[in-house]
Image (spheres, rainbow, N blue to C red):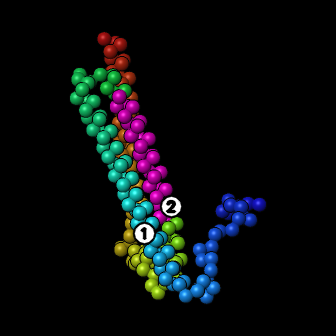
């Protein structure tokens, strides 16, 4: 049987975060809970580091493709139809990498969201809920001070490059066909 709202099996239970209460666990409960909390925060930081490294990788790759277009323009003098076909191929590659980059950003966002949900649940059993409080400040009711989520800002970079590569692709295909027609007519 499936749940029509969540598209999940209704028989499947969500795993519980706290398997044992403090009384049943024993005297080391709070100490072990704090250690698990530290592990979760450390894992969330590592995901953020990987996310940053991933963004650097894609930005470097996209920059190299743009540089390649510049190099191709210097190698293919006078500029011929072949140059435009190369630009089209590089642009198509750039579009694919931008789509992969956007997917990567979304995956890291989902992983971080899940990790911080767990961290916030653990904080409910700790003396202070620092992360939950921090987010409450960032999502202030004052709209002027609204925090733009990093993922939303981050996603614009590959989108802008995608638009650039799309424009280059269209122009290069038009110019390649124009160069072929011009060559044929001469």
For this view, does 76 lie left or right of residue 11?
A: left
Label 1: which residue? 42
- Proximity of marks 1 and 2: CB atoms separated by less than 8 Å: no
**Magenta stretch: dominant SS?**
helix
Res. 3 mark: none
Residue range (magenta): 86-113
Residue 62: x percent and y percent?
34, 43
On the image, the x and y values in percent for residue 89 come to 39, 31
Quadrant in which the N terminus appears = bottom right
Q: Identify the secondary structure beneath mark 2.
A: helix
In the rendered image, residue 112 lying in the magenta stretch gets the answer: yes
Relative height, residue 176 to residue 119 (above, below): above
Q: Residue furthest right?
A: 1
Task: Looking at the image, tell me whether mark 1 or mark 2 is earlier in sequence order.
Answer: 1
Residue underneath mark 2: 110
Q: Is residue 53 visible?
A: yes
Camera-side mark, 1 or 2: 1
Q: Secondary structure at mark 1?
A: helix
Residue 21 magenta-highlighted: no
Residue 71 position, x and y percent, is 25, 32
Residue drawn where x is 39% and y is 49% of the image = 158
Residue occupying the point 47% across, 56% down: 106
**37 or 182, nearer to the observer:** 37
Q: Where is 82 relative to 135, above or below?
A: above
């Amino acid at each position: 049987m499936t749940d029509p709202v969540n598209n999940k099996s209704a028989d499947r239970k969500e795993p519980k975060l706290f398997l044992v209460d403090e009384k049943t666990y024993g005297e080391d409960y709070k100490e072990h809970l704090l250690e698990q909390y530290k592990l979760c925060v450390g894992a969330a930081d590592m995901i953020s580091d990987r996310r940053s490294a991933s963004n650097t990788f894609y930005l470097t790759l996209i920059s190299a493709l743009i540089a390649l277009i510049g190099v191709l323009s210097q190698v293919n003098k006078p500029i011929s139809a072949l140059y435009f076909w190369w630009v089209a191929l590089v642009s198509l590659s750039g579009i694919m990498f931008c789509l992969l980059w956007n997917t990567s950003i979304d995956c890291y966002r989902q992983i971080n969201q899940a990790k911080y949900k767990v961290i916030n649940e653990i904080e409910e059993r700790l003396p202070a809920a620092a992360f939950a409080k921090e987010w409450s400040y960032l999502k202030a009711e004052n709209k002027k001070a609204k925090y733009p989520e990093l993922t939303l800002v981050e996603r614009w970079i590959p989108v802008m490059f995608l638009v650039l590569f799309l424009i280059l692709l269209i122009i290069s295909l038009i110019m390649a066909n124009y160069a072929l027609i011009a060559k044929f007519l001469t």
